[in-house]
Amino acid sequence: MGRIELLQGDITKQEVDAIVNAANRGLLGGGGVDGAIHRAGGPAIREEARLLGGCETGDAKATTAGDLPANYVIHAVGPIWQGGDAGEAERLASCHRRALEVADELGCRTVAFPAISTGVYGFPVELAAKVALGTTHVELETHAGIEEVRFVLFSDADFQAFQQHLPS
Ligand code: ADP
């Protein structure tokens, strides 16, 4: 079964088959990690994303990775935190499931994720870490082609939150 790794750093620098973007439903770029990915990857990502017609919350769609070291960017749309009673955890789980399904369909063996929804979208990082890691752990059982999922956390606090919820 594939392994889960944690790393503190910049997802745009990762040499993996696919990096996952914390996108919004328009898929045309935004702030945070989305902006960083589009800046580092160049205009090819946006040009291809324009043809996808957006993406629902909880779903994921792939494009080229342009100038990035990765081969693909998988744009996953996480939920906006609304207090926790609006199905946010299930939709966060869903966007991780879908991103891993898309990665497997594309033949990716290594995949890097940021902490989706924990920035501007306001999802509490402790709960996000639990959902992201728990969902990934379960999904790796059914996606035998995926050898490594790497969570790339930007801040030390996020790295520590993920470390506390790493499945054994
Ligand atoms: P969302 O809108 O889904 O909340 P954000 O981009 O605002 O997405 O934040 C998601 C997470 O990505 C935050 O923890 C933020 O610190 C982190 N982040 C921002 N830039 C990068 C980067 N270059 N590499 C990895 N993580 C990043």
Image: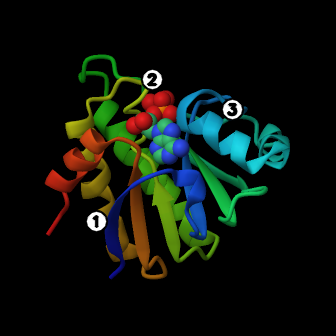
* Image quadrant in which the C terminus is located: bottom left
* Image quadrant in which the N terminus is located: bottom left
Percent position of residue 62, x then y: 67, 54
Query: Nearest the camera: 50 or 150?
Result: 150
How much space separates mark 2 and mark 3, taking CA atoms?
A: 14 Å
Looking at the image, is 104 positioned above or below residue 165? below
Which residue is disc 1 drawn over? Answer: 138
Q: Which disc is residue 120 wearing?
A: 2
Percent position of residue 54, x then y: 69, 34
Q: Secondary structure at mark 1?
A: helix
Q: Does mark 2's beta carbon lie closer than 8 Å to ligand 1?
A: yes
Which amino acid type is shown beneath numbered disc 1?
A: Val
Q: Which disc is residue 163 wearing?
A: none
Looking at the image, is 63 positioned above or below residue 118? below
Looking at the image, is 14 positioned above or below residue 1? above
Looking at the image, is 142 positioned above or below residue 85? below
Q: Secondary structure at mark 2?
A: loop
- From the image, state whether disc 3 or disc 1 is nearer to you: 3
How much space separates mark 3 and mark 1, taking CA atoms?
A: 30 Å
